[in-house]
Amino acid sequence: MAQSAPQLPREPAPSPASSESNAVQTRFGWLPEVGTWKYHLLLSAVALLVLGPLGGIAASYMNFSVGFFVGGQVLAGILGSAVTYGYGSEGKHGANYMQTMAASVASLCAMSVLIQAMVWMGMQLPPAWHLILFVGCVGMFAVGVGMLYTPLLVDRLQLDYPSGYAVANILRALTDKRLLKVSISKLGGGTALGALAAWATERIAVVAAIGTSAATVGAGMIVGSRITVPAVLMAVIGKLSLPTLRELGWLGAEDPFRKVGFLIGLAMICGAAVVDLSMLAVQYAARVRARAAEAGAEEPAWKKVNMPRLLAWIVLWGAAAVAVGTFVLGQPAGWLLFGMGLALLFVLINGISYGITDQNPISSAFVSSIMLMSLMGLKNPLVALMAATILLISTSVGCDMQQDRSTGWRLGTNRNIQFRYQVMGVTMGALLCVGLAKVFMTAYPALTINQLDNPKAEVGQWGSAMTYKLVGAIRDLGSLSDAKVQALLVGLAIGFVVQVLRKLLQRHQGYQHYIRSSKAGFALGWTMDSLVLASPYASSFGGFVAFPVALWFGGGGIIASVFNTLAKRGAKPEPSGSPGEGEALPEDMSTMSLVGGGLIAGESLFFLIAGLIGLASLLA
């Protein structure tokens, strides 16, 4: 089967909007010129006062009820495109700024479950302004860390970030008449199918029972079978290994594989990352030595980031977060610094997972941090929660920033301006995070009931699955089992060894020539990449999710591979004609990427709107 992961586009050429030029011709005379303070005031007002709170309220509600949240990038992108439609195709940059800000608000608002966790554990809540200050400082630190890893994950590794991919295609299509004309049926059809599948999951028991997820299928269609098949393989191996794992004491009689699989998966990513980061360090050192020879290869203006200032930002806000945590909240500085160190690691690890599979396993990162603190002898649950809060917020906000940068990479959007919009979003998100937690728990006392202690309590729709996981992990503090340590060591070894072997194969010229020279060679290459020496980053997904989810993810990649193979066989010469007739889409707006992005958009919109409707009905 042909590899279905679409080729990433060439780096976008600088455009008037990306360089903040005022030369863009607007369709409506009342619109402010691009790059002026009035222009940014318009975008900021819409994002901060409308799109951000809309996504933030929905994200908070969803985490309190179903235990997951949708950041709202798709909705913010669509509504933002309506605001910037008058700027023509260059409106995509303004819409991207707005969805960046709105997504930052939503990411922090979803963290209101941390305050709920404190209530469940009977902790005395600090004054609201103390929490706002701490959450805000951690959010600012996370913004910097997310930007720090952007050159590696987005520019160098060129990870797909499926949702970011989908948002980029939506923004381009909605702001460019030519692209809209040739892509609307694919994008719109996928969106309708995604919304329909989400509705069926909610309303039809049989569909829900098989774990249907249109967004998961869509993500698989975007990244391709060489990424999705390894995830299925790990899930299948885990399923078959259940009797053995239970005999070893790694799992209880009724436990699913993912209870230990996520530990193995996280460790596999760590092991592979050790190899990759070591190689990148060597390459970076070589590049520094050869910088004089590369002086002519200037980086595009929209892509440039002042690294010394960025590092200073991270250090400043990291110090501020520790200072607030120590002197305002009374927590030990050592454990806060430990949480910050883990954040530097897990923003990278989760960023890789997010970039490949569209899944950001923040709860798994939280559980892993609690386990590590337990291993180091920490017994105080409040200290553990506050240190792990740094990690949870950082992985949510930092990975969201990387996804937004992947969207910006495809559009050529100015990164420094995106950074400023995200900073404003974090500020609003910190205010709303604490405020929404207070409002929800005051209005709905069921949210304050510790469901671990009261499993039969009547809580209605407030399932609080995320809080359940967080509090359950903290309760294991001080009792890290040998099985969990063994699982981490096994995963670390697998990830390291497999990645070393993959790198050796990639450097073997004879092997590389063979897999490119014939169909038999291609089949061997696909088998090695997908089954024998599959990427640890891709395989790990099979340990994070339930078995049906891994199958849907794999199905999406296989569908895309089969489609792309058949499309190549039946390809005809590109038609010529007058402008607008027979024009091809950009490389990364292929049929499968558009349909897959539509599926993600449809499911995201459905759950976001359903969450808002559910909240409105409760308030009525």
Image (cartoon, rainbow, N blue to C red):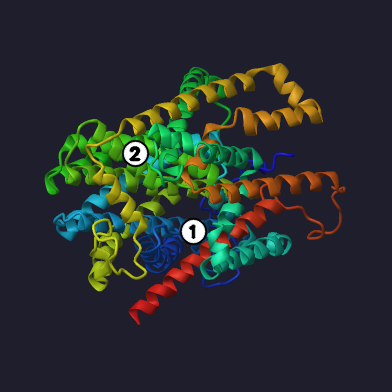
Query: Label 2 neighbourhood size at 10 Å, few (<14), some (14-19), many (20+)?
Result: many
Say which of 515 and 327 sits in front: 515
- Tell me, yes or no, if residue 266 can be seen here: no
The amino acid type, in three-letter code, at marker 2 is Ser
Residue 544 image position (x, y, % from top left):
46, 44
Using the rendered image of the protein, determine whether residue 550 is visible from the camera's viewpoint. Answer: yes
Give how far across and how far down residue 337 sits, in percent.
24, 35
Crowding around mark 1 (Cα neighbors within 10 Å: few <14, some 14 to 19, many 20+) is many
What residue is pinned by disc 2?
368
Rendered location of residue 169, percent (x, y): 61, 55
Residue at x 30% of width, y 37% of height: 371
Q: Of residues 78 and 186, which is closer to you in this image? A: 186
Q: Is residue 521 left or right of residue 144?
A: right
Q: Quadrant of the N terminus?
A: top right
Quarter of the image that includes the C terminus: bottom left
Tag 1: amino acid: Gln
Nearer to us of marks 1 and 2 is 2
Q: Secondary structure at mark 2?
A: helix
Query: Which of the numbered marks, if any, corresponds to residue 73?
Result: 1
Residue for point 34% across, 62% down: 64
